[in-house]
Image (cartoon, grey):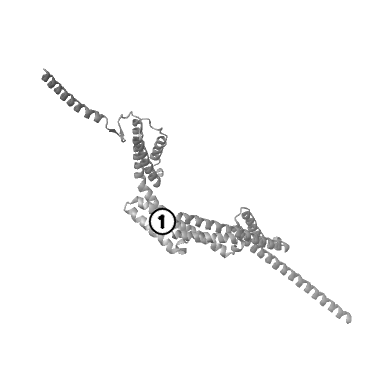
Amino acid sequence: MKEKYIKQRGGLKIQYLILIGLIFPFIAVSCKTTPGGTSGGGLSAPVDDDSMIAIARARTAAEETRSEVEYVDGSTYCPDEWELAENRYSAARKYDTPITRGDALTQVEEWKALKVDYENIYNQALPQCAAEQQRLLAAARENAVNTGADKLVPERFAQADDVAESSREKFKKDDFISSIREGREACDRYKVLQTIAAAHNQQAEADKYDFFSSDPDSYKLAADAGNRAVDLYDENRLPEAQEEAEDALNRFLQVVQNGWGYKVEEKSSYARKWRAASLDVKADVASKPEFDAAEQVYNRARAVQTSENYIRAAELFDESGKLFIIAHDDAVEKQERADAALREAERRLTESKSKAQAAEDLIGGE
């Protein structure tokens, strides 16, 4: 009996072990890691570090793609799609901190879907942006040429041309992102050179009219900024070069503007002097057409001066002064002719009187 009992217990033990062996794998399977790297508890379990990391990675990926869309001006070329994606983005940024793993998984999927939206916009905008960049590139070069940059700094202009040509070649090969990047660099180069040339042109005008003497400190600061702009361009520090070039241009513009301010006072005084001289000789009566023409230009000069367009005002005052001289000289000439005629008449009258007196004397002597 005892042996039989032992055998039965042994059989039961074996059966028990077999049963545990069947159940344990099922338990293990049910406890495997859930999506996002969490372990145990299912989607209703509290959120853990792995879930938060998954959210951060999905959000970073979406925002990186969003930045790429901004780089190719996606909002310009796909405005409706961009607006929808941005509304979705704004909502996603306001998500509360997830409580459960299920909440975390929902946020991960939303960020992934948003990334897909931005990718679609990027793919549509990229070729359009590249084509527009080629147009901007041509315009930037033309503007630089119009200011004389190609003549003023030919070697540096050739460098910009090389970058522009590389951009065009990449565009032809559908390497749009590289074409855009190099196209923008070339545009920046052209813009710096254009601004440097514009500053040089203002400096030339200041030199032509000796405006240095009216504002030497500003002139020197402008020249120093221009030299720094060239140096920074050579170092490929284009944003800083542009800033210095604009500073040089603005300072030279101020020098020229101030110079013309002094010049307009000089020309105004010149016009007033000859206007008064014309009135003294009654040119407004004796040479009315000439005086009226001068007066008309003079009044225009005063009006332009009031609007602070000093360059044009100086030109008009100078022109009116010359016209007043014409009116003055014409009036003087007419007066001189009248005086000469009067003197001639007086001479003839005197001569006639003398002859008459001589005849009378002759008759009386007989």
Residue 285 lies, in percent from the top left, at 71, 61
Q: Nearer the viewer, residue 286 or 147?
A: 147
- The residue depicted at 12 percent of the width and 22 percent of the height is 7
- The residue depicted at 59 percent of the width and 60 percent of the height is 217
Q: Is residue 302 left or right of residue 64?
A: right
Q: Is residue 213 left or right of residue 45?
A: right
Residue 54 lies, in percent from the top left, at 34, 37
State the image quarter where residue 282 is shown: bottom right
State the image quarter where residue 4 is shown: top left
Q: Is residue 36 above or below residue 334?
A: above
Q: Is residue 81 above or below residue 328?
A: above
Q: Quadrant of the N terminus?
A: top left
Q: Nearer the viewer, residue 337 or 207?
A: 207
Label 1 sits on a secondary structure element that is helix
Amino acid identity at mark 1 = Ala
Q: Report the residue marked by disc 1.
A: 186
Say if residue 26 shows up in the picture: yes
Residue 120 lies, in percent from the top left, at 34, 42
Say if residue 147 shows up in the picture: no
Q: Residue furthest bottom?
A: 366
Q: Quadrant of the C terminus?
A: bottom right
Residue 242 lies, in percent from the top left, at 48, 55
Say few, some or many: other residues with alpha carbon within 10 Å of mark 1 (under 14 / 14 to 19 / 20 or more): many
